[in-house]
Amino acid sequence: MSYENPQLNQLKRALPDPIRNLCWFIFKWIPIAIVAGFWEIISGSVVSSEILPPFSDVVLATWDITITGQIVPHIQVSLFRVASGLALSVTVAVLLGIGMARVQAIENFFEIPLALIYPLPKIALVPLAILWLGVGTATSVVIVFLACLLPIVLNTYNAAQNVDQNLIWSAQMMGMESWKIPLKVVVPATIPSILTGIRQAIPIAFISLVGAELVASNRGVGFEILRHGQIGNYTSMFAVIVVISLIAFFSVRLYELGERRLVQWI
């Protein structure tokens, strides 16, 4: 059943594309504007401005730490950790997902460990990772890797299980060796689902990274958030949060743009 308003659709079609796109852009950002306005109002009235600085001050602080380059080295460290953990999880998850889908023994071996790891908050593993790997990049990369692993594994596994059997039979009839079928047939058929899993994993990567850096790092965005909070510089603390939120947001959007183009090409 459709709940679309025909008159509204007619009005949309009557508007030129630039105006329609502008209106849609403004409409999508209205909730953010409402939150920002509400934040500005309650700061200093309902909540002390020392604890919750005005949104306008946070915007100015965000601009300041970005223009001066104060936050740039920490962003570089955090992005390296996100990229490393995500790349490692993609590599392992794709191999594991396809292997579990195509080989029963692999599925039986990994099914219970993955089921146990899935509901476990990955931040809970930070103390153990510190004990094994120390404070620094290795711990953050491992936490990001574990946090991103399951979404990609599940998407890859489900797609590999549902590959059209006719494609596999056709490859076998054409004389393709069995060990080549996963690479030549299964992987290309699962690429859209793998890309979807990666898209789901990107925000998880940033969430887990900041959590790990809050506890187990002396550099990075999460460390900066903790440092400013400890000295009571809440304006800069919120500014760093805004910066990493924007980076995560635009990372997902850029990935979606590349994903759409890649899927069209495939």
Image (cartoon, grey):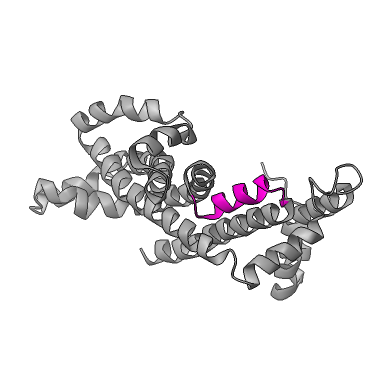
Residue 227 included in the magenta stretch of the image: yes
Bounds of the magenta span? 218-233
Q: Is residue 266 above or below residue 2?
A: below
Residue found at the far front of this picture: 231
Based on the displayed image, in which of its 4 quarters is residue 69 positioned?
bottom right
Q: Residue at x 20, y 48 (%)?
A: 182
Reply yes or no: does residue 123 show up in magenta: no
Q: Position of residue 248 (x, y in %)?
A: 56, 56
Judge left or right: residue 67 versus residue 11: left
Q: How many marks?
A: 0
What is the x, y in percent for residue 163? 29, 44
The C terminus, quarter of image: bottom left
What secondary structure characterizes most of the magenta part? helix
Camera-nearest residue between 15 and 103: 103
**In percent of the image, x 67 and y 52: which residue is there?**
237
Residue 95 vertical placement versus 188 (above, below): above
- The residue furthest right is 45
Quarter holding the N terminus is top right
- Write the residue at 47% across / 43% down: 216
Q: In the rendered image, which quarter is residue 64 located in?
A: bottom right
Q: x and y percent of residue 256 in the render?
A: 50, 60
**Does residue 163 show up?**
no
Q: Residue at x 48, y 36 (%)?
A: 123
Residue 24 lies, in percent from the top left, at 72, 63
> Can residue 182 be seen from the camera position used here?
yes
**Front residue (pair 130, 171):** 130
Image-based side of 1 in relation to 256, left or right = right
Q: Is residue 237 above or below residue 115?
A: below
